[in-house]
Amino acid sequence: MEQAVRVDGLSAGRPVAGVPEGVRDAVVVAVPFDAAVVGFGGCMAMLAASGVRLRVVVSGGGPASRAAVSREALASLGAPQAELEWLEGTRCDEGVRHLSLLVKGADLCAAPWCGDRGTAVGSARWAALLACSLRLRPPLVEYWVPGHCASRDCGEPWQRASRVSLPPGAERLKRRALCAGGVADPASGRESGASVGATRLGSREILFL
């Protein structure tokens, strides 16, 4: 069995900054998958390094080649054993039912923040909110992805934002995953439609807790 990649001394049972302590099983809603690497890739690398079981939920069935890219990016994050789950159904209620089963018994669920429920991302985020509230657990954290919303003011809840500083090892793995997935490096300073403007996220990630 492959061992988790060490990230700056993190080991099994060690808490990861920005997420609740005692997490052993985490579900990551990755819709789209590229956004999860950009907004939560460093945290996924740290969770994997600390021995957390990762289940990554992607949308649709997708072509086999896309699944291969997802697995390559996960391996680049030091999470080769992360489990890929396909989010079934196209309606929000179908997503809620499916996610309710997936989050049962998990200690944490992470989903992309999006204020527009009419988009695929917003629908997945809403499904995650409902699934977690229906089960009364696990706690939900929402990761911020620059430029997710088309409108200028998406109403991001900055009052509950938490900045996670990535250790060099996690940042390096995230950059590797960005290259593996063919995703634009957020540290390049690309312009974001969010209220904070152009942001460099190579060494940090923002979670809404």
Image (spheres, helix red, strand yellow):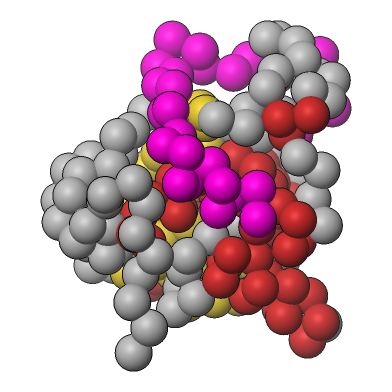
Tell me where residue 65 sits by quadrant: bottom right
The front one of 151 and 13 is 13
Q: Is residue 67 above or below residue 173?
A: below
Q: Is residue 112 in the magenta section? A: no
Q: Position of residue 85 (x, y in %)?
A: 54, 76
The front one of 16 and 63 is 16
Q: Is residue 172 above or below residue 97?
A: above
The residue at the point 15 percent across, 56 percent down is 13
Magenta segment: 147-176
Q: Is residue 151 in the magenta section? A: yes
**Residue 137 visible, this orientation:** no
Q: Give the side of residue 200 with respect to residue 208, left or right.
A: right
**Residue 162 visible, this orientation:** yes
Q: Residue furthest bottom?
A: 1
Query: Which quarter of the figure is the C terminus placed in?
Result: top left
Q: Give the side of residue 183 with respect to residue 126, left or right.
A: right
The front one of 159 and 47 is 47
Q: Position of residue 86 (x, y in %)?
A: 60, 75
The residue at the point 27 percent across, 65 percent down is 51
Q: Is residue 142 above or below residue 108?
A: above
Q: Give the side of residue 186 with respect to residue 79, left or right.
A: right
Q: Position of residue 144 (x, y in %)?
A: 58, 31
Query: Which quarter of the figure is the N terminus placed in?
Result: bottom left
The residue at the point 39 percent across, 65 percent down is 5
Q: Give the side of residue 125 with respect to residue 63, left or right.
A: left
Tell me where residue 145 sits by quadrant: top right
Q: Position of residue 94 (x, y in %)?
A: 58, 67
Q: Is residue 129 above or below residue 48?
A: above
The residue at the point 44 percent across, 22 percent down is 163
